[in-house]
Image (spheres, rainbow, N blue to C red):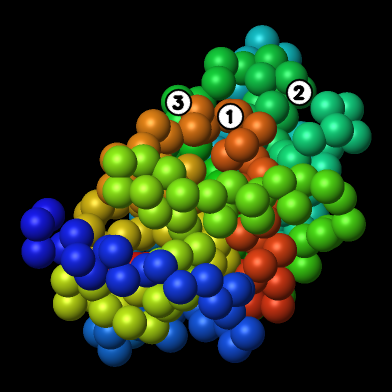
Amino acid sequence: MKRLLPLLLLCSIAAGPPVDLRSGYDDASAETRAMQDDDGGNPGFLWVREGEAQWSQPAGPLGKSCASCHGDATVSMRGVAARYPLIDKATNRPMTLDRRIGECRTDRQQAEALPPESDAALGLAAYVGLQSRGMPLNVDADNPFVAAGRRLFETRMGQLNLSCAQCHDDRAGMKLAGAVIPQGHPNGYPEYRLEWQAMGSLNRRLRNCMVGVRAEPFPPDSPEMAALALYLAVRAKGLKVETPAVRP
């Protein structure tokens, strides 16, 4: 950490959001990009197949599956992931795709909630996300939560007193401990990360970053985490959905 701290503290000049959008795919090694491009070799597809099986699997006392309401996911879910997070009319707050899937399960199927970061939860999110692969992110930015998310992105936090923007806006493309600092776009989640050797959600990545600067992470279902996810999606508008992406 003593060696990393001076590099982290270089992230101090406010430059604003990136003008030329770069997916994390663009900053990955040739080997990692090849892994993502090959559906047969992309380990994220292990979770996709889990989600595909769950799509038609009845759950809860009503014996309903996702397919009972939505039919063929390759048709009904086309483009859905590209529009999330969106503002939920019932709660008037940002709703992430992960949370929407969870609420459908508990409210519509009346089934037990899937544990966060479980293979089942990640699998369903990855299967739904796959149906929008190649489509540009196009999240509605006409709401006050985007500004709230941007403030969180630009707010210094933790014992290291760093903000998300200081690294992912100001120093994107530079290197930290030998790795390229990405712009931090969410267009591949849930994604398979080589450092985790597993699939993970955007929530997990954000928690990791907050812990990395020695800050207390926001709760997964908090308004703060939802607003931050919304801003990240708006910030990445136009980038193509890559679910399930592969990252270092």
Q: Earlier in the sequence, mark 3 or mark 2?
A: 2
Judge the density around disc 3: few (<14), some (14-19), many (≥20) Cα neighbours within 10 Å.
few
Residue 108 visible in the current orientation: yes
Q: Nearer the viewer, mark 1 or mark 3?
A: 1
Q: Earlier in the sequence, mark 1 or mark 3?
A: 3
Q: CA distance from mark 2 to mark 1?
A: 19 Å
**Left or right, 114 with reference to 67:** left
- As drawn, the label of residue 108 is 2
Image: 161 above or below 241: above
Tell me the residue at 29%/64% (across/down).
Answer: 9
The residue under label 1 is: 221
Tell me the residue at 56%/54% (across/down).
Answer: 153
The amino acid pointed to by label 3 is Pro
Judge the density around disc 1: few (<14), some (14-19), many (≥20) Cα neighbours within 10 Å.
few
Find residue 130 and report its image quarter. Answer: bottom right
Q: Earlier in the sequence, mark 2 or mark 1?
A: 2
Q: How many marks?
A: 3
Q: Quadrant of the C terminus?
A: bottom left
Tell me the residue at 71%/29% (across/down).
Answer: 104
> Residue 174: where, in percent of width, then height?
33, 82
Q: Nearer the viewer, residue 190 or 227?
A: 227
The amino acid pointed to by label 1 is Asp
Q: Element under label 1? A: loop
Task: Find out whether the residues at labels 2 and 1 contact each other: C-beta distance under 8 Å.
Answer: no
Tell me the residue at 35%/73% (across/down).
Answer: 181
